[in-house]
Every structure is written in structure tokens, then in C-alpha cells.
Amino acid sequence: MLNLSRKYKDTLDYINNLAPFSPEIAIVLGSGLGKLAQKVNVKKEISTADIPLYPVSTIIGHAGKIIFAEYAGKNLLLFQGRIHFYEGYKIYECLLPVFISHSLGCKNIILTNAAGGINPNYVPGDLMLNSSMNGINIKKELNNFIGIPGSDGIRNFNNFPSPKLNKTIKNAALECKIDLKEGVYWYCKGPNYETPAEIKMAARFEADAVGMSTVHEAIYASYLGMETSAISCITNFAAGISATKLNHSEVTETAKLVETKFENLVKKTIELS
């Protein structure tokens, strides 16, 4: 049985030796959303390339840094760079940001991602608070993740999202005058984009946006008892909705256009937390 605390002892020791504080809020920054780190008071920046056993991020828009920062009197832990399952990593490696956050004593986590819009009322540049998630395409790997003690607990996903944290995010959107959408995030493994037929299927199951991350992180963070919420940046229309061919540069370009709105929402959420 895999014991994450034992396997990643050197990883945690390395980070703990450099950590200036125990974080209150962790934020995983999705594709193109990493510039939030420039808007807060950075206390310590760690390159993930220097951290023992930490996977290398191979995707454009994921810098590969762990940042301890302060904003509005709150201690933050920012992950600039996500570990994707489609990069060839094991599921437990993809859960490292959540595992590290929890191990450092963090109680709250906000997961962010870039997503394709399925809901016809969504347009690129919208922000969507995740009201629920579809994890059909990842649950098998999570169920096989025997490193989680008491595997029965991972089967219950009813405590996501956090009502408390979601309410704070909604209040932040109101104060910032942001038209925050709320909908269901549909997970696909990637790295290939979904086909138009797959998008039609997801729409029939009431999915509002689709992406290649976040669900397994949310399930694990919720399992660990963390207050967990997720925000999707709608960066493109999903396949079959637009005639434009999908590409990752479109994702990162749209994320750049909406970064100020995203930053304002997250900063106000931190202030109200």
C-alpha cells in the first residue's frame, strides 16, 4: 500500500524547511492564470524543479513554482503549474498540490482551470463557479489509489463544493460586479480535445463546461476535509459549438484577456474569507 507521507517525506521536508508560515488558503492556478502571483506579497518562491520527487510540468502556461505569499492579512500557498494526468503521471502524483497543502495545515483550497464552454449561454472570458463535477473518467484511477486510508471514504463526493467557500466567492463576485456563472464541470482525460459527439453527450448530461483537470483534486481535497471550491475560466467554445479548430494557444490567450477579472475575483474572495 502506497503511503504518501512516507513516499514524499523528502518532498515535505524540503518545502517545510523553506516555508515561512502555515498557509490558510491554497490556490492551484490553471492554464494562463498564473499571474495572480504578481499581485500578492510574495514571501517565498520555490521552483518545483528543485523539489525532490516533484513532477515536472510540461504544459505551456504552467510555470512550475510553489509560492508562499500574503494578501489582505491572509497567508497563501499558490501553485503556478498543475500536474496533469494526461502528461503520463500517476494519479497520486497529480494530487501532490492538494497533499502538500493539507500537510502544511491548510484548511481551504481554491482550484482553478481553463475550460471549454458547453452551455450555449457562455462565451470565452466568462468565469464559472463549479456547482458540481462529473468524474466518470477519473474515478477508476482514484478508486485504484490504495494509498488513501479507508478507501470507502473517497466514494462520497457529496461535500463538494464547500457551501461556505462558494458563498464567499459569490459575494466577492457581487462586490466586484462580475457576472459569475455557476455550472457543472465535465472532466475528460485528454490530452486530445473532445470530439463534437462527446460534447453533445456531455451537454445531455447537463454539463456546462469541459476540461482536463481539477476533478480528482477536488475529490481528494474534499476527502481530506478541506473547504474546496473550483472556478473555471471559459477560454473557448467546446468542439462542435464553434467552427474554429481548438488549440492550446487560444486557451492561454483568452486566459490572459480575462486575467484582471479573475485576479479581482480571487483577491476579493481572499479579503472576505
Image (cartoon, rainbow, N blue to C red):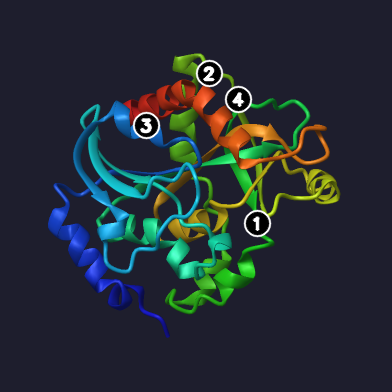
Q: CA distance from mark 2 to mark 1?
A: 30 Å
Query: Badge 3 is on which residue?
Result: 36
Q: Residue at x 67, y 39 (%)?
A: 116
Earlier residue among tags 3 and 2: 3
Q: Secondary structure at mark 3?
A: helix
For the residues labelled 2 and 1, say whether their Cβ atoms are less than 8 Å apart.
no
In front: label 2 or label 1: 1
Q: Mark 3 is on which residue type?
A: Leu
Residue 256 position, x and y percent, is: 50, 27
Earlier residue among tags 4 and 1: 4
Q: Mark 2 is on which residue type?
A: Ile
In this picture, residue 185 sits left or right of residue 89: right
Q: CA distance from mark 3 to mark 1?
A: 26 Å
In front: label 3 or label 2: 3
| Disc number placed over residue 190 in the picture, else none | 1
Residue 45 position, x and y percent, is: 23, 45
In front: label 4 or label 1: 1
Q: CA distance from mark 2 to mark 4?
A: 11 Å
Location of residue 200 by image quarter: top right
| Disc number placed over residue 125 in the picture, else none | 4
Query: Badge 2 is on which residue?
Result: 178
Q: Mark 1 is on which residue type?
A: Gly
In this picture, residue 258 sits left or right of residue 138: left
Q: Mark 4 is on which residue type?
A: Gly
Earlier residue among tags 2 and 4: 4
Q: Is residue 252 above or below residue 177?
A: below
Q: How many C-alpha atoms fall within 10 Å of the one at disc 4: few (<14), some, or many (≥20)?
A: many
Residue 239 position, x and y percent, is: 78, 41
| Disc number placed over residue 79 in the picture, else none | none
Q: Secondary structure at mark 4?
A: loop
